[in-house]
Image: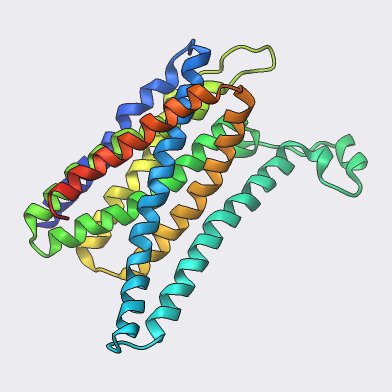
Amino acid sequence: MALHTTLLLGFIAGVTILFGIPLGRVSRPIPAAKVVLNGVAIGILLFLVWDVFSAAWEPLDAALTATHEHTGGMGPVFGYGALFVGGLSVGLLGLVAYDRYLERMSNPAKIGPGAQSVAEKPLRTGGIASWSMAKRMSLMIAVGIGLHNFAEGLAIGQAAASNEIALATLLVVGFALHNATEGFGIVAPLAGDFDDDGARVLPSWRFLLTMALIGGGPTFIGTAVGHQFTSEPVSVIFLTLAAGSIIYVVAQLLGVAARARRTDLLAYGLLIGLIAGFATDAVVTAGGV
């Protein structure tokens, strides 16, 4: 398959993330709807964790099977195992460290020893450090989804480069459906963004489109890279990075959900998100992928 056709497939698979983005501009979300939407986001992300771990574990599982059947050595086992643990650690702990850094930048009085003198001369903050917690959460979700979608793009590019047109097309359909649900996950935290007076803070279209680009753009980039070469270790690295970052975000969203004290609505949202994730995955599975 020609490169320009492959890139078009990658664009189609990634652009559907825009479907859920306009929801971030709803000016007066119903309180109950916010809890449900938060649950939907958690459900979608939990599905992605399962999906990512399943794909990232396959090479390691195959290496272990080869060792058991005496058709392979322990080298690939330790190699893939190191990539798995390393990617997961960096994805999870990296976001923890970055989030702590942003918190220190936005709250200079809490930096530590000598905090009083620092507080007297506040640090100049800007960029992401000046964002609200809701916007930071949205960014972290977009980053985690983007890492995941890069690996999906690699699969599309690989299938297209091998002239497996039916497989590539089916992957695009399945991944496009996945991305359509992921847009809701990105904007979900924004429903709880309020200023000091309790007024709803609407994100700009520029911010929303940037989050969509971070989350969906890597599908296109991964497709281009996958068309040129394939690398299972690279896929494992990006998948485990995605898993670690998504796990951290899920933990944060669960904390937000706990403060709402509406476990019934949270459960409804979780169920909707999980069903949406597995239903879209079923499209790919039904095609024999």
Question: Residue at the spot x=30%, y=89% of the render?
Answer: 70
Q: Position of residue 14 (x, y in %)?
A: 27, 42
User: Residue 145: percent from the left, percent from the top?
Assistant: 40, 45
Q: Residue at x 50, y 27 (%)?
A: 266
In the picture, measured across the screen, residue 115 lies left or right of residue 243, that is right
- Type of colouring: rainbow
Residue 163 falls in image quadrant? bottom left
- Is 200 in front, or is 248? 248
Identify whether 280 is placed above or below 159: above
- x then y, percent, for residue 175: 25, 44
211, 134: nearer the viewer: 134
The quadrant of the picture occupied by the C terminus is bottom left
Residue 276 can be seen in this image: yes
Task: In this rendered view, identify the residue nearer to me: 8 or 136.
Answer: 136
Q: Is residue 197 found left or right of 86 in the rendered image?
A: right
Identify which residue is drawn at 61% across, 18% down.
194
Number of numbered discs = 0
For residue 275, what is the image quadrant? Answer: top left
Q: Write the residue at 43% across / 25% down.
A: 268
- Residue 187 in view in this figure: no
Residue 131 position, x and y percent, is 61, 32
Please name whichever residue, 62 or 18, is drawn nearer the observer in this view of the structure: 62
Horizontal side of 190 relative to 180 (left or right) equals right
Q: Is residue 22 left or right of residue 104?
A: left
Quadrant of the rendering where the N terminus is positioned: bottom left
